[in-house]
Image (tube, helix red, strand yellow):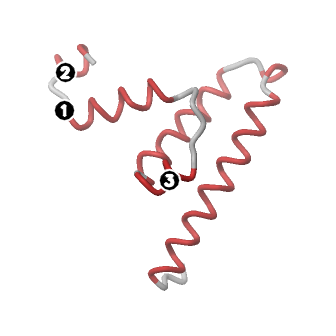
Amino acid sequence: RTVLTRLNYPEQYVNNICTMVEMHDIGITQEDLKTNFVLSKKLFEVQKCDIYAHNPEKNENRYRYMARAENAIKKYEMSIQEEIGDDD
């Protein structure tokens, strides 16, 4: 936080980065998707990078989580598109 603030990043950006760092090992829930979908998607990308940074032989649980989270994100995106009638 100190370094980002010293580099004059906006407070909201600093808060989002710190939240992602704090939560990078915590699974994304349906409630997270509903509460802040954009931040949840960004957090998932951070989690994927973290997973790929670890030894692949010891990542079986992390890969399963990644598949479940990715499916949940896709389902949530589809439900949003259905609500607004977006066919893309």
Dot 1 crowding, Cα within 10 Å, few <14, some 14–19, many 20+: few
- The mark found on residue 33 in the picture is 3
Contact between labelled residues 1 and 2, with CB atoms less than 8 Å apart: yes
Examine the rendered structure and indicate whether residue 28 appears above or below residue 62. Answer: below
Q: In the rendered structure, which amino acid carries the disc numbered 2?
A: Thr
Task: Give whichever of 35, 13 is nearer the camera.
Answer: 35
Residue to which mark 1 is pinned: 11
Between tags 3 and 2, which lies in front?
3
Q: Is residue 18 left or right of residue 50?
A: left
Residue at 49% across, 29% down: 23
Q: Along the horizontal axis of the image, is 8 left or right of 38?
A: left
The tag earlier along the polypeptide, 2 or 1, is: 2
Residue labelled with disc 2: 5
Q: Is mark 2 on a helix, strand or loop?
A: helix
Label 3 secondary element: helix
Tag 1–tag 3 contact (CB < 8 Å): no
